[in-house]
Image: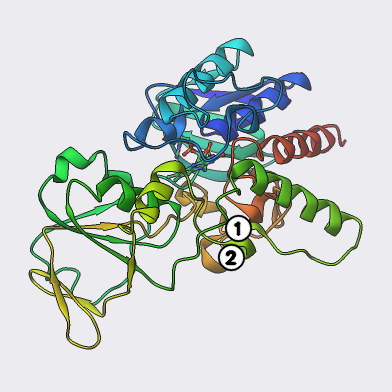
């Protein structure tokens, strides 16, 4: 089955829905193809205790403010799934799932989007597949020699699954800090970070980070000096569970170990720690393998873009993967603006003779 359409959006998480909102407003004929069986994107996969680092109103997609969650200043992942489910129904977004896009090829004046259920021929494509589906594991000596269990952030669920175990959590970002805080009471925990931990000031939450990113964008737009990205403020948002564990003195990080042994980890000075489980909170890469046939890959696995538009393939937009596809585009509140810009650029492109 081959169907022609104006735009195919690949991925039905928050970025794909924000794109859908703006494509709908511009009256384009489009479809959103999503590999998940149900709405909510990666938020459906989150560990049990994960809460947003921003209040609800600062976690909103275009057009619809996220309602507050009773009893929670910072809503949990379930609340985000409910919000995204309501969002796609409210705007009657044409999401088809589960459909996995396998490959995108050039096809004359169209892009051919091959899926596990058929082929779409689109005049433009927005890829919004996120990063959760491509966990990154660093090359550490001995990783295959270790006899215990190894998880990535994506595989972690709750402390009860690891109760009583010796656990090493690797990673000095938000996932590492939050999962370490989650485990401090239930496990014998070692937290390891590549560089000394950098907690943001306690007053800085996602709302303040968004304000900082907005002020920076405004300064850059006006040609003023760069105030530095949010990374210049620190690595770890001090959400309440992290604050509690840190203030109780339970969240002290060790430097990165040199290698894994059969039974644990070993530092450069020969010190060892036994481990039953190692949890790699070591980040993600953009899930872009479906775009490989276009031959657009640039440095660090990114595709070179101007804003969201691929430099070498103007019919392709990349949305929601991080600052390289728009400031704060990998956040709920930040993805709206690049989604709008992508829709505007596509309207212009499609109206060309
Ligand atoms: P996803 O939610 O991953 O959605 C992508 C969708 O595309 C998925 O449904 C996936 O199945 C589908 N897909 C993938 N490949 C294909 C394919 N080939 N074909 C078809 N469909 C495909 N942001 C905030 O604003 N506030 C926070 O507090 C916050 N906390 C976070 C905490 C963690 C631990 C992480 C990892 C991220 C957090 N983020 C937060 C960042 C961001 O909001 C989330 O990562 C969000 O899920 C990104 O949305 P997305 O739509 O880009 O990707």
Could you tell whether 169 is left or right of 344 in the image? left
The x and y percentages for residue 352 are 86, 36
Q: Is residue 99 left or right of residue 17?
A: left
Residue 134 visible in the shown view: no
Are circles 1 and 2 on residues that touch, CB within 8 Å? Answer: yes
Percent position of residue 17, x then y:
59, 27
Answer with left or right where residue 254 lies relative to residue 71. Answer: left
Give residue 116's position: percent from left, percent from top. 39, 31
- Mark on residue 298? 2
Q: Residue furthest front?
A: 248
Q: Position of residue 177 (x, y in %)?
A: 39, 54
Viewer-closest of 181 and 76:
181
- How far is disc 1 from disc 2 in space, using C-alphas? 5 Å
Seen in the picture, residue 207 relative to 77 is either above or below; the reply is below
Relative vertical location of residue 104 with respect to residue 301 in this rendering, above or below? above
* Element on which disc 2 rests: loop
Residue 62 sits in which quadrant?
A: top right
Q: In which quarter of the image is the C terminus?
A: top right
Sequence-wise, the earlier of marks 1 and 2 is 2
* Residue pictured at 25% horizontal, 86% vertical: 268
The secondary element bearing badge 1 is classed as: loop
Within-10-Å neighbours for mark 2: few <14, some 14–19, many 20+: few
Neighbourhood count class around disc 1 (C-alpha, 10 Å): few under 14, some 14–19, many 20 upward: many
Image point 47% across, 21% down: which residue?
Answer: 71
Find residue 303 and name its label: 1
């Amino acid at each position: 089955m081959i169907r022609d359409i104006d735009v195919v959006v690949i991925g039905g998480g928050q970025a794909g829905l924000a794109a859908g909102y703006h494509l709908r407003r511009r009256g384009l004929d489009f479809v959103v193809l999503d590999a998940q069986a149900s709405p909510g994107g990666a938020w459906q996969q989150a560990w049990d205790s994960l809460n947003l680092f921003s209040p609800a109103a600062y976690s909103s997609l275009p057009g619809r403010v996220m309602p507050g969650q009773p009893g929670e200043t910072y809503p949990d992942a379930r609340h985000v799934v409910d919000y995204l489910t309501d969002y796609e129904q409210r705007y009657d977004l044409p999401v088809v799932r589960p459909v996995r896009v396998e490959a995108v090829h050039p096809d004359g004046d169209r892009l051919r989007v091959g899926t596990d259920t058929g082929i779409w021929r689109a005049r433009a494509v927005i890829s919004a597949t996120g990063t959760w589906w491509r966990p990154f594991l660093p090359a550490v000596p001995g990783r295959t020699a270790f006899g215990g269990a190894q998880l990535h952030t994506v595989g972690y669920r709750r402390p009860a699954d690891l109760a009583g175990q010796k656990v090493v959590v690797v990673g000095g970002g938000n996932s590492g800090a939050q999962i370490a805080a989650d485990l401090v009471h239930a496990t014998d925990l070692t937290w390891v970070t590549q560089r000394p931990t950098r907690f943001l000031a306690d007053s800085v939450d996602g709302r303040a980070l968004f304000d900082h990113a907005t002020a920076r964008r405004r300064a850059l737009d006006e040609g003023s000096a760069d105030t530095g990205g949010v990374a210049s403020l620190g690595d770890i948002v001090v959400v309440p569970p992290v604050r509690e564990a840190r203030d109780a003195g339970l969240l002290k990080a060790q430097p990165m170990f040199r290698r894994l042994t059969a039974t644990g980890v070993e530092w450069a000075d020969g010190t060892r720690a036994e481990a039953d489980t190692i949890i790699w909170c070591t980040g993600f890469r953009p899930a872009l393998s479906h775009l490989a046939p276009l031959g657009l890959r640039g440095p660090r696995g990114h595709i070179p873009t101007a804003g969201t538009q691929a430099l070498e393939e103007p019919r392709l937009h990349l949305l929601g993967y991080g600052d390289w596809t728009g400031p704060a585009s990998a956040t709920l509140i930040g993805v709206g603006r690049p989604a709008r810009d992508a829709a505007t650029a596509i309207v212009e492109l499609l109206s060309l003779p």
